[in-house]
Image (cartoon, helix red, strand yellow):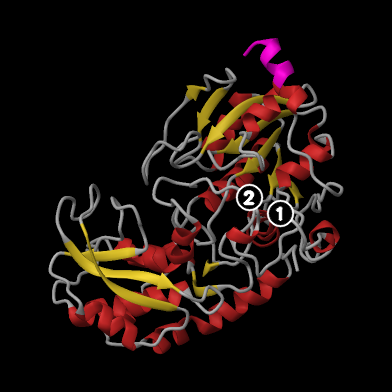
Amino acid sequence: MTLSRRGVLGLAGAIGSAGALGAGAADGTRGAAGTAAGRAAGAGGRVRTGFERLAADGYAVLAGQKVGVVTNPTGITADARHLVDVLHADERVDLVAVFGPEHGFRGTAQAGDSEGASRDPATGLPVYDTYDKSGQKLADVFEAAGIDTVVFDIQDVGARFYTYIWTLYDCMRAAALAGKAVVVLDRPNPVGGRRAAGPVLERPYASFVGREPIALAHGMTAAELARLFNGEFLTDRPVALRTVAMSGWRRESFFAETGLPWVPPSPNMPTPDTALAYAGTCLFEGTNLSEGRGTTTPFEVIGAEGIDRRWAEAANALGLPGVWFREAYFTPTFSKHVGKVCGGVRLIVHDREAFDPVRAGIGLLITARRVWSGFGWRADHWIDRLTGSDRVRTLVDSGADVDEVAGDWAAGLARFAAVREEYLMYP
């Protein structure tokens, strides 16, 4: 990139924000989370992201450091410029590397894939691939990149099996091994953060869709999770952690209320409505039904060949709060049942506050099994990785109802909720 490009973008700068930098405790220990910048944030106006507040403070926490950024297309300013372009153009920041997660830095790869290593044509910066790397292997990538500090800024969607939070976890562990610091720039949980829901992972079922025991719908932001990871799961070697809080975000806020632009965090997460359903309907990845990939409404439509209106009728008969189920038909263009007409349901969420996506997902699993003789689990029991144990699968197979399945995880969820409370940063 030429000096003139740096100069032009540098004059534009990052979008301004009100208030001082909201930086978290350096050690990420318990009890530090519920005060300071997060609770001081006002409720009026749009949300200011962690990046905006970092910029407003002149990037002070990055001064004198060689910086690498873990991000993807969601790492943008309020006026939709990418933070890599903004940071590279600013002489106050020594940005030397970019790290891409699953789906890649530019977001072109499908689930379970990445873009590999490359050089960013806009800035000339090297782009390293973090996907499927953890521990010393990822620490070696950080060493090779020549960085002092890893900055993380990616939009999450609030579900344990959405892998960006585990990229954050892996980066924290690897940074500690390599002697690097981590700075997490916070963004909203798009489905709110009032409560946690669903089963808590059991460690024998840990994978990249769930490294540690947290609830399926965690109800936390990335910065809050980073503090929890450091305080609960990385105690053998905690990382030097700083978190930069948002201002203006409250736990009851859904994404539409933030005033921020939505960028799909992954190819099959096109809208905030998709994110709202995802924690429940992604469970169908563990079955032989389509979860709507290859349609314009992934995770909002579910179905398979041979399913008819009886599924929607059975699901509505459950009386689950906040949601209706409409008979739907669709033809996926890729993934399961590609090119075949599928019958199934579409979720219509009419009360976001009452809606519990995990209970809705369980209800749909139960009713699909009851009304469609073709229902089956994936042969590898992927559902167990998604739910965090074999309990949901075995209970559904035994004929349990929604309350019985949810009751099975209630004690573990209550324990997690108590721990979670100590790391929350926002009112």
Q: Which residues are magenta?
A: 1-8
Q: Is residue 11 above or below residue 154?
A: above
Q: Position of residue 240 (x, y in %)?
A: 75, 45
Does the segment drawn in magenta span residue 219? no
Dot 2: element: loop
The residue to which callout 1 is attached is 47
Residue type beneath disc 2: Leu
Pointer 1 or 2: first along the chain? 1
In the rendered view, tell whether residue 96 sits above or below residue 314.
above
Label of residue 260 in the image: 2
Q: Determine whether, in the image, residue 110 is placed left or right of residue 220.
A: left
Quadrant where the N terminus is found in the figure: top right
Assign the magenta stretch its main secondary structure.
helix
Classify 10 Å Cα crowding around label 1: few (below 14), some (14-19), many (20 and above): many
Q: Position of residue 250 (x, y in %)?
A: 71, 65
Q: Is residue 2 highlighted in magenta?
A: yes
Residue type pointed to by label 1: Val
